[in-house]
Image (tube, rainbow, N blue to C red):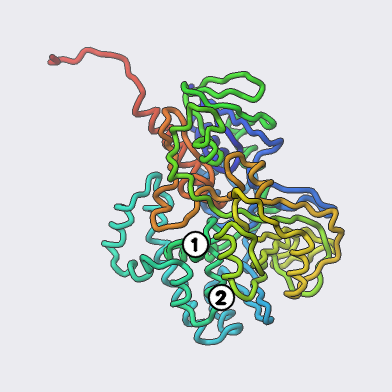
Amino acid sequence: MSQVLVIGAGLGGLSAAMRLAHAGLKVEVFEAAPYPGGKLRALPSPAGPVDAGPTVLTMGWVFETLFHDCGLSLADYVTLTPEPLLARHFWPDGTRLDLYSDHGASIEAVHASLGATAAREFQQFDADTAALFDAFLDPVMLAPHPSLSMLTGIVLRNPGLWRKMASGATLTRHLNRRFSEPKLAQLFGRYATYVGGLPHQVPALLSLVWQAEAGGISRVEGGMHQMALGMAQALRDLGGEIHCDSPVRRILHGPEVELADGSRRTSDHVVFNGDPKALWRGDLGADPKHAIRRSAVLPRSLSAEVWTFAASPRGADLHHHNVFFGTDPTTEFEPIGRSKAPEDPAIYVCAQDRGTGRTPPAVERFQTIVNAAPLSNREEVRPCYETTLHALAQRGLSFASQTDKAHRTTPKDFAALFPGSLGSLYGRSPKGMLATFQRPCAQSRMKGLYLAGGGTHPGAGMPMATLSGKHAAEAILSDRTSTSTSRQTATRGGI
């Protein structure tokens, strides 16, 4: 029975561990935190635990498939509830726009809020991005080793994609051409931040990110961190082990890992579920530094300023996912591109206790997110809690709450939580046309060392990190098969 050691119990590591345990390998996971989940974490509040990491679950079929492939049922571990209203958007002039998983309902909502021309432009944009998403899902996002030649082959077989991709244009430029209504360009430009990029720096192809959400979102009952807890329990049921409060100090050739207490564990394979930049920088010793190329980890993606708290909201009619836009997106993204604090940024507000058919309690749980640059050589002044609340109050949302009960997580805090990251939440930046092909894949350049997590292909987000674990597990199982030995036998007629 082969021994596999997994460093990190994020969704990528747990996904790989589940698949390998199901395949009959002996799997142990070592997690530095006192709980599994990685960025999928929750913080306490007077109203109960508040999600302090990802709040939107897309592509639920990825998780259904994971459990099914392991002979389990997702419903036995986690309860997912579809949320038909994707997000509620607010602008300073009083405009409000809801988007839905029902595309027809979204078109009607755009028509009602922004007019007939905007609705026609949105309908065409939705159709074009759906075609891009469908074309690139299997050969790029689901493929373990995507390549530029693979992308070129797809376009050559379907020339109509070339226009939809707007090759050579940035997302900002592409959207400004497509939409006569600036609010729609602003709204869909923000989707670049969902994968850690700035809309004026990433390729227009990233317009397809909208389709991951348009395909439907779900809420995880009990909070998003329940997904990590459910996967951890599934791993135990499959025979795997998880050791929390067990940080790894070094990865050695062998492969072998050295724990913080000085003890060493030898294995056949090691899966690193952390930011690949930690390996390249030497945070886990000299041996794995060569496993990652510099271009695979630099430049860095966005970070964030996150607040979690309990409060009683007033004013704006909130749903579960809400975005309060500023007047001009350039005042947010251009300063971030210069490693400065954003001016008049969009503010995401997750009202965790709200949603379709739900009646919120008197005191609700909230998470707010403002995009931020990763750490740089010069420390910038970050927005404080009062600044965020003041901006929201100007846009129609206020709270009755005690600010001393709020928890703040800054880029500096994220850098401490996730070593080597510089606070980046998505690994390498998606800046540039070739960024997709520069992100590291599951198989590293160090024998026996494999990668999983949001910093690894196919990228950031709960479903993508989970798919990275699938790629890591498949690479290990493939390598075991190709290097297995068989008993020597005599061959008749041999030389």
**The image quarter in which residue 335 lies:** bottom right
> In the drawing, what numbered circle is on residue 252?
none
Indicate the quadrant containing the C terminus: top left, top right, bottom left or bottom right.
top left
Farthest residue, direction front:
378
**The image quarter in which residue 317 lies:** bottom right
Q: For the residue labelled by badge 2, is the local secondary structure a helix, a strand or a loop?
A: helix
Residue 248 percent across, percent down from the top left? 61, 28
Q: Nearer the viewer, residue 340 or 297?
A: 340
Residue at 59% x, 79% y is 109
Residue at 75% x, 55% y is 308
> In the drawing, what numbered circle is on residue 209?
1
Would you call the spot at circle 2 few (<14 residues within 10 Å), some (14-19), or many (20 or more)? many
Q: What residue type is labelled 2?
A: Ser
Q: Earlier in the sequence, mark 1 or mark 2?
A: 2
* 440 sits left or right of 482 in the view: right
Answer whether labels 1 and 2 touch (C-beta < 8 Å): no
Would you call the spot at circle 1 few (<14 residues within 10 Å), some (14-19), or many (20 or more)? some
Residue at 77% x, 65% y is 389
Residue 256 percent across, percent down from the top left? 52, 22
Q: Mark 2 points at which residue?
A: 106
Residue 283 percent across, percent down from the top left? 56, 33
Q: Disc 1 and disc 2: Cα gap in Å?
A: 16 Å
In the rendered image of this protein, does residue 53 appear above or below residue 325? Answer: above
Residue 107 percent across, percent down from the top left? 53, 78
**Whether residue 200 can be seen here:** yes
